[in-house]
Image (spheres, coloured by chain):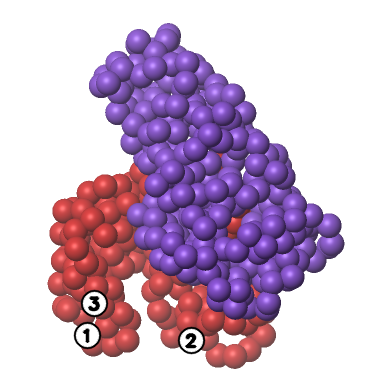
Amino acid sequence: MIKWMPCALLVLAVAGCTTPRPTAPNRAPSAGSVEELAAAIAADAKRSDLESDARIRGDLAADAGRNADACLAREPRAAACLYGRAIALGLEARAHPTRAGELLKSMLGSLGESEAADPLYDEAGSARVRALVLIRSPGWPLGPGDAEAGLVAARRAAALRPKWPPNLLALAEALAKNGDPSGARENYQHARDAAVALPSGADRDRWLQEAEEALRRPAGH
Amino acid sequence: MGTLLISAVATLVFCAPGYPGGAGDAQPFLDQFAATASAAAGWPAGSLAAVYDPTESGGLAKLASPEAALAFVPYPFFVQHGAELHLIPLVQADMAGIGTTERWTLVAKTGSVTGQASLSGYTVLSVAGYAPDFVRRSILPTWPLAPDVVIEPTGQILSALRRAAAGDHVVALLDQTQAAALPTLPFAAQLTAVMQSNPLPIALVAVVDDRLTAARVRALRAALLTLGHSAAEADTLGQLHLKGFVPPQLPGRAAAR
């Protein structure tokens, strides 16, 4: 009855959807290149994911929005900037739950544009993030959530970059949401195997942990 | 179950099966509501706690605990579990933008369902599908369903509507918000509302068994019925999409329980 609650009780961990990049130097957004601005947005997303203070999450969302605007001012059709805008909108939705519905719709629009510009950007990030937004958001009519469309997007991401653990994790989550626990389990196993094959690091460890935790859960949970 | 001591902390269990939202997300709003309601009732500070569970089984488990003195549940949950949990209606929710009651609408592929007999072999999918008593007795009291009609819960009503439109043997039972949004779907023309319920309560606050003293119940009821008169209270209610509360006005069968 979360028409009782703000529909936004959909807190999306956007940072978990993005691929880590080198952190941009701390400088005014207008001074950065497209690559630096995209990296700054990814860094904001990662910090936001770890931040419990709502005010700081709001500041990070605002910073990401400024960086996305600056990026688009430089190259309006660049996949990096369109994708960055989508991520910034996701952070804003998390920071301002009462506006989450409209912000997530805009986010999906930006993801569509970035995927059209370069479907492989961020290891098929546009399709992957689209999948996660669609499977984690409240469904019609309260929000843009659509588990079936989310599964389609997750399959697309996994087909484009089949060895990238976040794509396999997203596909597993989408399959679980669509009532296919065995398919979900199979893809959590693939995600674990893919993560093990990567060089060690914090992100690889996080992906590995997510896959292993899912595999430890009883079927159907 | 004995009445809680006056100094004990009573717990208000919010349970809304089928609707999105996690317990952690909802908790700050529930804490604020509990503090506001207990202060308005003149209860000691900290004497009312609130918890949320989005699942039927989780809500039932929480309501079984001795500390669970109050329940804030959708009407379908009340119909399905009110008797076994000894829920006594206290007040009825007045939802922002909807009111105190809502109609439920049965939606089928256009031309496929002409009466209850043609539902034979169908599955009724609904966010309230966890409460078959509610579906059969409250929604469809004049539409006795054949024994082979299956009633199932779904949190993905859009998928249910797609299946119905595609010709699967399913019908979707929509709450008022969902029914109002039906025309926005691209495949809305393939669907028809075949039945609409009478107005039914949306949600209730109920006392669980006799776990509160009569004095505390009276004070809380009076407070809830006037809650929202101040700006701060209205803001607290607004966070839960509530406008206020009214005395319970239940259809005969549920009220008689």
Query: What shade has chain B been given?
Result: purple
Q: Residue at x 63, y 67 (%)?
A: B34
Front-most of residues B113 and B243: B243
Q: Secondary structure at mark 3?
A: helix
Query: What shade has chain A been given?
Result: red
* N-terminal label among 2 and 1: 2
Please, what is the three-letter code of the amino acid marked with disc 3?
Leu
* N-terminal label among 1 and 3: 1
Question: The numbered mark 3 sits on a residue in which chain?
Answer: A
Please, what is the three-letter code of the amino acid marked with disc 1?
Pro
Q: Residue at x 75, y 52 (%)?
A: B225
Front-most of residues A151 and B148: B148
Q: Is residue A192 visible?
A: yes
Q: Secondary structure at mark 1?
A: loop
The residue tagged 3 is A208
The residue tagged 1 is A199
Real-space Cα separation, disc 2 to disc 3, in angstroms: 23 Å
Q: Is residue A29 above or below residue A89?
A: below
Please state the horizontal and vertical placement of residue B165, each as a whole percent of the image.
40, 23
Residue A33 figure quarter:
bottom right
**Few, some or many residues within 10 Å of mark 1 (<14, 14–19, 20+):** few
Q: Residue at x 30, y 23 (%)?
A: B149
